[in-house]
Amino acid sequence: MMKLPQLPQRLFAALPRPLSVLPGLPFVAGLETARRFGWLVPPPELHDHRFALYVADLDLRLRFRCTAQGFRPLAEGEADLELGASSADFFALLRGAADADTLFFQRRLAIRGDTELGLVVKNWLDACERPA
């Protein structure tokens, strides 16, 4: 199998601020699509918060904000909550094959920032039904 090159975060950090959202655009578009289909509707407690996902094995930080109107890319400002894990662990969470608590206690999921907000996110994701 061909190994794809990794694109380090510092490559994207060199971009002007408006372009620094480019790495996260496909991710945010996926979140927004899931929201519009009713698969991933964020609770009001998440509105007006900023989030980051750090994909450690790709050295990639995906930044976005949650509003009452949906998910939007985030170009500036610190995230209120950052979750960090490997791409495989994030995919396992998405599929429901792994539990956030288990990954956290195995030190495979890192949480930085507002821990109360992290608990809201965890409970929300645990309660979401995944489409077939």
Image: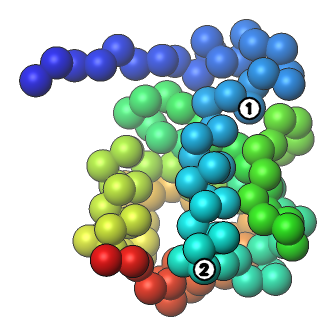
Residue 18 image position (x, y, % from top left): 85, 25
Tag 1's secondary structure? Answer: helix
Marks 1 and 2, how far apart at CA: 25 Å
Q: Which residue is mark 1?
A: 21
- What is the tally of numbered marks visible in this picture? 2
At 66% from the left edge and 78% from the top edge, which residue is drawn? Answer: 41
At 16% from the left edge and 18% from the top edge, which residue is drawn? Answer: 2
Asked if residue 88 lies left or right of residue 70, the reply is left
Up-down relation of residue 122 to residue 2 (above or below): below
Asked if residue 119 lies left or right of residue 8, the reply is right
The disc label shown at residue 88, or none: none
Up-down relation of residue 53 to residue 121 (above or below): above
Up-down relation of residue 6 to residue 125 (above or below): above
Q: Quadrant of the N terminus?
A: top left
User: Does the rendering let one see residue 86?
Assistant: yes
Which kind of residue does numbered mark 1 sit on? Val
Which kind of residue does numbered mark 2 sit on? Gly
Q: Which residue is mark 2?
A: 38
Sort mark 1 into few (<14), some (14-19) or many (20+) by Cα contacts within 10 Å. many
Tag 2's secondary structure? Answer: loop
Residue 96 image position (x, y, % from top left): 33, 74
**What colour-coding does the image apply?**
rainbow
